[in-house]
Image (spheres, rainbow, N blue to C red):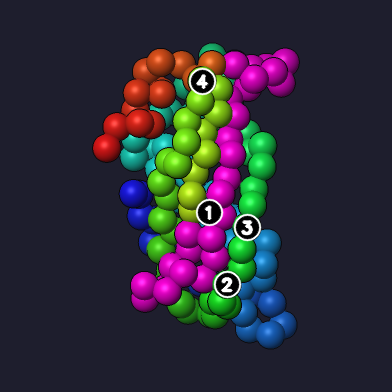
Amino acid sequence: MHQFPLRVYYEDTDLAGIVYYANYLKFIERGRSEWLRDRGVDQVAMKDQGLVFVVRRIEADYLSPARFDDALVVQSRVVEMGSARIALCQKVVRDGTVLFSAVVTLVCINQAGRPVRIPRPVAERLTQN
């Protein structure tokens, strides 16, 4: 499981002083980007080859609010991988308590927007422990 620490800033909160719901999606996006980087996947090089990962589906549960200055951790792990898609379980956690949980499905697409196989070297990096 990959872990990405982050801090809640004032700009992340709403009038009630809690993290605005859409910002959890930004938090898990950062977690996915860092997970890919830590696995040695160069998304810029993939884009230069005409390939990108896009979000196909998100199933999200908001369980408890985060607040200004909270120290959070985004946890990411692969739950399923196909030839062109990856399903990740991502959680936003504070002090061991899950605040937000999502299953995110990514698809590898080409420049025409069509699903394509994840390149073998990338797939191997994503499935290593």
The quarter of the picture where residue 108 lies is: top right
- The secondary element bearing badge 1 is classed as helix
Mark 1 or mark 3: name the one nearer the start of the chain: 1
The reply to whether dot 1 and dot 2 touch (C-beta < 8 Å) is: no
The residue pinned by badge 1 equals 28
The CA span between labels 2 and 3 is: 10 Å
The quarter of the picture where residue 94 lies is: bottom left
Q: Please, what is the three-letter code of the amino acid marked with disc 1? A: Ile
In the rendered image, the vertical position of residue 33 relative to residue 51, given as above or below: below
Q: Nearer the viewer, residue 91 or 33?
A: 91
- Indicate which disc residue 63 carries: 2
The residue pinned by badge 4 equals 83
Q: Which residues are magenta?
A: 91-116
Q: Please, what is the three-letter code of the amino acid marked with disc 3? A: Ala
Residue 110, horizontal then vertical, whole percent: 64, 17
The CA span between labels 3 and 4 is: 24 Å
The residue pinned by badge 3 equals 60
